[in-house]
Image: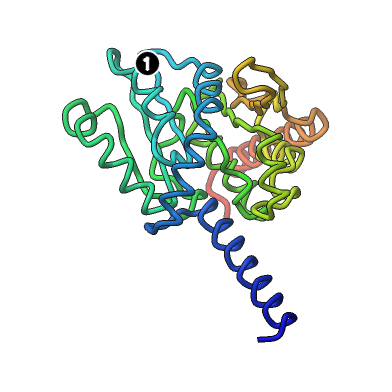
């Protein structure tokens, strides 16, 4: 085999390996690569999960929802906070492999306490939960793998299942994401926080912001937070609101006029 053909073969093999790693990061499947990648990801993101759970600080009676729970480390942290109260921990995961691993991990908690519920969600735009259910919704290392044209609708669905005043929290670690980008696992446009902030605003979340933190153990990390308004008028454009009120007033005046005409004619309209 010529050196050029051998070099091309190595390059193609590297591309295939990189592509497989990227796919396993996005959606782990039951395989040796999936096992290694999911364990590596869980180890690297454990500190960030701790910071996110500390930030949301769920009370014993809170309902908490994680999207993309992986091995379930953050779900366990939340469970420890609600197990003695009336609260529950919910999670959805697109990866059947991760869903299976987490279900086995929490088999006793699910059977004996009914405090953990694990669901599959192929389409995050259609969650199997009622409106205004959760005090907290959170995710770590998730939105990078979601299609841009679906993010707004996904965030609208997350807004729907949050209680009024509830908070959505997203944990990020730019340094680790930059390393994954350097190795060809991610593209920088995938984890651009401005992209996610914009979709949250378009989904009509309030108080959308990103905050930068530093921890001696893990270094710099970032938290994106957004709130579901407890005030139905909060966050609405004043001009649009006035237009809606004017239209409602016109409809009301028209209805009154029609009722007056009906009384004057002494009967129903033809």
Left or right of 75? Residue 260 is: right
Q: Is residue 247 visible?
A: no
Query: Please, which residue is most extreme toward the bottom here?
Result: 1
Number of residues whose C-alpha sits closer than 10 Å to that of mark 1, classed few (under 14), some (14–19) or many (20 or more) = many
Q: Is residue 65 left or right of residue 111?
A: right
Answer left or right for 35 relative to 153: left
Left or right of 219 in this view: 54: left
Residue 174 point in image, percent of width and height = 70, 34
Which residue in the protein does label 1 denote? Answer: 81
Q: Residue at x 72, y 80 (%)?
A: 3
Q: Is there any visible trace of residue 122 in the rendered image?
A: yes
Tell me which residue sits at (40%, 22%) in the image. Answer: 77
Quadrant, the N terminus: bottom right
Q: What residue is at 56 percent from the left and 43 percent from the top? A: 142
Q: Residue 60: x, y in percent? A: 36, 13
Tag count: 1
- Location of residue 207 in the rendering, given as x and y in whole percent from the top left corner: 70, 23
**Judging from the image, what secondary structure is the residue with disc 1 in?**
helix
Image position of 84 with respect to 261: above or below: above
Residue 59 percent location from the top left of the image: 41, 13
Q: Which residue is rendered at x = 67% and y = 51% of the image?
A: 186
Pick whichever, 193 or 246, lies toward us. 193
Question: On the image, which quarter does residue 261 sit in?
Answer: top right
Colour scheme employed for the rendering of this structure: rainbow
**Quarter assignment of residue 7:** bottom right
Q: Decide which of 179, 193 is in the foreground and name it.
A: 179
For this orientation, the residue located farthest to the right is: 239
Quadrant where the image shows the C terminus: bottom right
Q: Is residue 67 above or below residue 63?
A: below
């Amino acid at each position: 085999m010529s050196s050029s053909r051998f070099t091309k073969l190595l390059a193609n093999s590297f591309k295939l390996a990189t592509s497989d790693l990227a796919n396993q990061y996005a959606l782990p499947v039951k395989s040796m690569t999936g096992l290694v990648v999911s364990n590596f990801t869980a180890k690297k993101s454990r500190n960030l999960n701790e910071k996110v759970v500390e930030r949301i600080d769920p009370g014993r009676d809170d309902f908490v929802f994680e999207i993309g729970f992986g091995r379930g480390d953050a779900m366990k942290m939340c469970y420890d906070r609600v197990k003695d109260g009336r609260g529950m921990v919910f999670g959805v995961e697109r990866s059947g492999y991760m869903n299976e691993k987490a279900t086995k991990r929490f088999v006793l908690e699910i059977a004996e306490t009914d405090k953990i519920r694990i669901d599959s969600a192929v389409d995050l735009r259609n969650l199997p939960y009622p409106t205004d259910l959760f005090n907290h919704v959170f995710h770590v290392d998730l939105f990078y793998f979601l299609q841009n044209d679906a993010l707004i609708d996904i965030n609208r669905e997350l807004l729907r299942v949050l209680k009024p005043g509830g908070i959505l929290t997203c944990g990020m670690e730019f340094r680790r994401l930059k390393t994954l980008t350097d190795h060809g696992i991610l593209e920088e446009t995938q984890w651009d926080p401005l992209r996610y902030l914009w979709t949250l605003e378009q989904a009509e979340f309030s108080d959308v912001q990103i905050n930068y933190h530093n921890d001696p153990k893990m270094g710099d990390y970032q938290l994106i937070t957004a709130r579901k308004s407890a005030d139905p008028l909060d966050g609405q454009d004043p001009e649009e609101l006035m237009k809606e009120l004017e239209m409602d007033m016109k409809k009301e005046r028209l209805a009154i006029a029609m009722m007056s005409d009906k009384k004057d004619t002494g009967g129903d309209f033809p």
